[in-house]
Image (cartoon, helix red, strand yellow):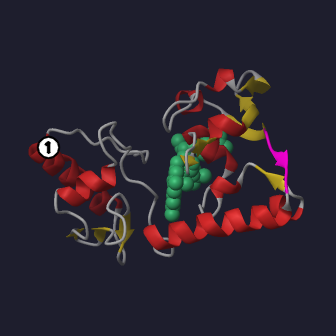
């Protein structure tokens, strides 16, 4: 963020305040404030075992809602060419501050979380559904649905991966029982 601000390069401000790597953001088609990686990625430089270094165009990335082709490939994202435009440094700074402040107001930013737990179903944001189910602030052992944002899970102390998984399954089951809505994790689970 300091680099784009200093050099007056606009287009990446939406990433501000999120702890993530470029490779992870591309693989996940990271997005917020109505912008996602699909909108700014020109091409992606990859290492593919047995093929070597390859460049994929935006179209070849098959970006979707928090998905890309890279989630199904054995590959390493090494870099990317992103589209930016020249703009005023002060304007960029202001936008970055606005986005970070919005996050600080609405999300648990200085607590251990992994970002959104569930993808938003088409009907309604996952946070609203969880809140309407009465589980905002619900705690299962050391994993807790945030009081600030119901689609974030906080590690209150030393939550284990099992605590997190049990809370995910508990919320999924209860939301399904109440509203017949299937919440699908946005976070990737490796077991
Ligand atoms: C406080 C907070 C707020 C967040 N807000 C948002 C938000 O608004 N919108 C949003 O979309 N996400 C959000 N996230 C989630 C997270 O930042 C994203 O999922 C991000 O896109 C990936 O983060 P990462 O770099 O940690 O990747 P990881 O979580 O480490 O990996 C994500 C996936 O990408 C793959 N991957 C990672 N690096 C590479 C690479 N170099 N080559 C190939 N594959 C790779 C991994 O195998 C994995 O499948 C938030 C997270 C936090 C903690």
- Looking at the rendered structure, the secondary structure element under dot 1 is helix
Q: Residues within 10 Å of mark 1 (few under 14, many from 20)?
A: few
Q: On screen, 44 above or below 92?
A: above
- Which residue is pictured at 61% across the width and 56% down the height? 20
Q: Which x, y percent locates residue 7?
A: 90, 59
Give the quarter of the figure containing the C terminus.
top left
Give the quarter of the figure containing the N terminus.
bottom right
In this orientation, does residue 20 appear? Answer: yes
Query: Which is more toward the observer, 121 or 169?
Result: 121
- Which residue is pictured at 28% across the width and 72% down the height? 142
**Start and end of the magenta stretch?**
82-87
Q: Is residue 115 left or right of residue 182?
A: right
Q: Using the rendered view, name the quadrant where residue 38 is placed.
A: top right
Residue at disc 1, CB closer than 8 Å to ligand 1? no
In this orientation, does residue 112 appear? Answer: no
Q: On screen, 133 above or below 65?
A: below
Query: Which is more toward the observer, 120 or 166?
Result: 120
Q: Is residue 26 left or right of residue 80?
A: left
Q: Residue furthest bottom?
A: 157
Q: Which x, y percent locates residue 157?
A: 36, 78
Q: Is residue 20 left or right of residue 92?
A: left
Residue 26 belongs to the span the image colors magenta: no
**Which residue bears the numbered disc 1?**
179
Q: Which x, y percent locates residue 163?
A: 28, 63
Residue 85 belongs to the span the image colors magenta: yes
- Which residue is pictured at 36% across the width and 75% down the height? 158
Q: Which x, y percent locates residue 115?
A: 46, 58
Q: Residue furthest left?
A: 177
């Amino acid at each position: 963020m300091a680099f784009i601000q200093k050099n007056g390069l606009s287009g990446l401000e939406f990433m501000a305040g999120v702890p993530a790597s470029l490779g992870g953001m591309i693989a996940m088609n990271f997005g917020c404030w109505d912008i996602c990686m699909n909108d700014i990625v020109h091409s992606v430089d990859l290492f593919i075992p047995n093929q070597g270094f390859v460049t994929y165009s935006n179209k070849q990335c098959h970006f979707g809602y928090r998905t890309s082709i890279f989630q199904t490939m054995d590959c390493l994202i090494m870099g990317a060419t992103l589209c930016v435009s020249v703009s005023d440094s002060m304007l960029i700074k202001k936008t970055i501050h606005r986005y970070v402040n919005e996050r600080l107001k609405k999300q648990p930013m200085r607590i251990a979380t992994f970002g959104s737990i569930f993808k938003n179903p088409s009907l309604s944001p996952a946070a609203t559904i969880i809140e309407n189910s009465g589980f905002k602030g619900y705690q299962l052992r050391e994993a807790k649905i945030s009081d600030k944002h119901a689609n974030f899970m906080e590690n209150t102390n030393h939550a284990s991966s099992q605590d997190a998984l049990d809370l995910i399954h508990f919320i999924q089951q209860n939301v399904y029982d109440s509203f017949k809505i299937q919440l699908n994790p946005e976070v990737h689970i490796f077991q």
